[in-house]
Image (cartoon, rainbow, N blue to C red):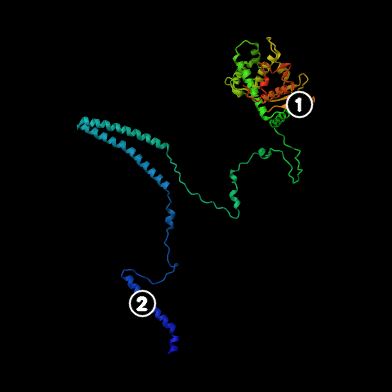
Amino acid sequence: MPKFSLIHRPYTRKLSQGIMKKATDQQTQAYFGQFKIKNSSKYKSTTDIPFPETHNEFLKTQAFEPVETLKAKQILMKDSHSIHSLVLKPLYFLLLSILTLSLHMLGIKRRYNLYLTIIFFVLTLSNIFFAILEIIKRRRNTTREIFIPVKQQKQEFDLQNPYLKFVKDNSTVVPLPTAVSNAALDLYRPFVPSDRPTASFQSNVNTLSIDTSIDQLAADSLRSLGLSDSEYGQYLLNFKTFISNIILKKLVKELHSDSHLIEAIVSLPAYENHREYVIERIKKLAASQYLAGHFGDRGDRFKDSEWNSEMPSDNQILMHVFGTWLSYFMSHNKKHHLTNIFKTKFVTLKRDPSLESTQGQLLCVEDWVRFYVLAKDKKTGQTRRFWAFPGRDSMYSALVIFFYIIKRDENNILDCADLQVEPICMDRVFSMSRFE
């Protein structure tokens, strides 16, 4: 008996478990039955549960309309309704005017209906007028631009070649002309690349421009004269103020006099036909502070015509005015005919000037554009060249250098004339105080 029970124990255990599970299911169904709820004891896996069906065709046909598009549609619908109202209003008043006119013709309250007819007819005309204006206004602005922010799609780049996103599109590249593409882009002097400390410059060094080389020569000239930048700047400003206040402004007040000095200043040699232009330029330069209206080797407009090479430049006019004024007080010549001593002895237009006929200083002019000073060193006897800075103030720069050498080497004596006495007072120019 014990042997039989041990052998059949698993079968009895399964039988008991099945009986208990069936009883439990019956109790559960009875419990849910009172609430009219069906319970299914059948187990379903997640793979057996169907997903909700999505209608792809509906999603494809149903377009996404953002808020801005809906607003635009509402605006267009509103406009269409307003256009209908504009058309219906005059029609409505026209019908009322016809109705009141018919009542007036039938003899029903004739005066009252006549007034109403006139009022309705006026309203009809006014509404027609406003409707026409509104339609014309809307036809001018037929399109409405509505900005709809759209999120940009992310650009996908090849992970194998990530540098491609930095490559410039060939369609945007404009080919350069052959002359430009073949030109050298490096404006500096090339050197021989080498790892040795004795790397030397190449023999074919790029030549500097004329203005750049003269600018460097002018800086070297100031250094050789012992002038600092601040001293040179103050002397240049004082010299321009000297010409403006001492010469030009006093000259303008005496232009209508019969003085032979005024006549000599106004009469520019080789430009006698442009006497009126010379007087006009003297007036304008005297009115400008620090000679701000000075154009250097060019001039200004005159009588609605542009300046040309047949007219004197500002450099020529001012050099003649200054030289004539200075020569008058240097020579003490009170005769009717006045000689421009300064311009004759100390200013030259020659390409290769010499210092034989001067006391040792000479102001040289190249096409009234570039200026320099030739001076003889008293100690060595050698002739040195001092360049003026290029630009509109090049002439004033050369005059400052010239008279600074006269002050340093000749003690302000120029051709036996003392430049310190009145009314010249050239020593006031070479002072660090401002010239008044």
Q: Is residue 365 visible in the rendered structure shown here?
A: no
Q: Which amino acid does label 1 sit on?
A: Arg
Who's the residue at 35% across and 33% down the image? 129
> Residue 34: x and y, percent?
31, 70
Who's the residue at 33% across and 71% down the image? 31
Q: Residues within 10 Å of mark 2 (few under 14, many from 20)?
A: few
Quarter containing the N terminus:
bottom left
Q: Is residue 321 visible in the rendered structure shown here?
A: yes
Quarter containing the C terminus:
top right
Q: Which amino acid does label 2 sit on?
A: Ala
Q: Measured along the vertical axis of the image, is residue 401 above or below residue 64?
A: above
Q: What element carries label 2?
A: helix
Q: Nearer the viewer, residue 305 or 340?
A: 340
Quarter occupied by residue 75: top left
Residue located farthest toward the bottom when viewing the structure as drawn: 1
Residue pointed to by mark 1: 384
* Distance from the alpha carbon under mark 2 to that under mark 1: 131 Å
Q: Which of the labelled discs sits on residue 23, or is there none?
A: 2
> Residue 38: x and y, percent?
34, 69
Residue located farthest toward the left when viewing the structure as drawn: 108
> Residue 106: x and y, percent?
20, 32
Horizontal side, residue 44 vs residue 425: left or right: left
- Tell me whether circle 2 and circle 1 mark residues in contact (CB < 8 Å): no
Q: What element carries label 1?
A: strand
Q: Which of the labelled discs sits on residue 100, or is there none?
A: none
Q: Which of 380 and 45 is in front in this view?
A: 380
Quarter occupied by residue 351: top right
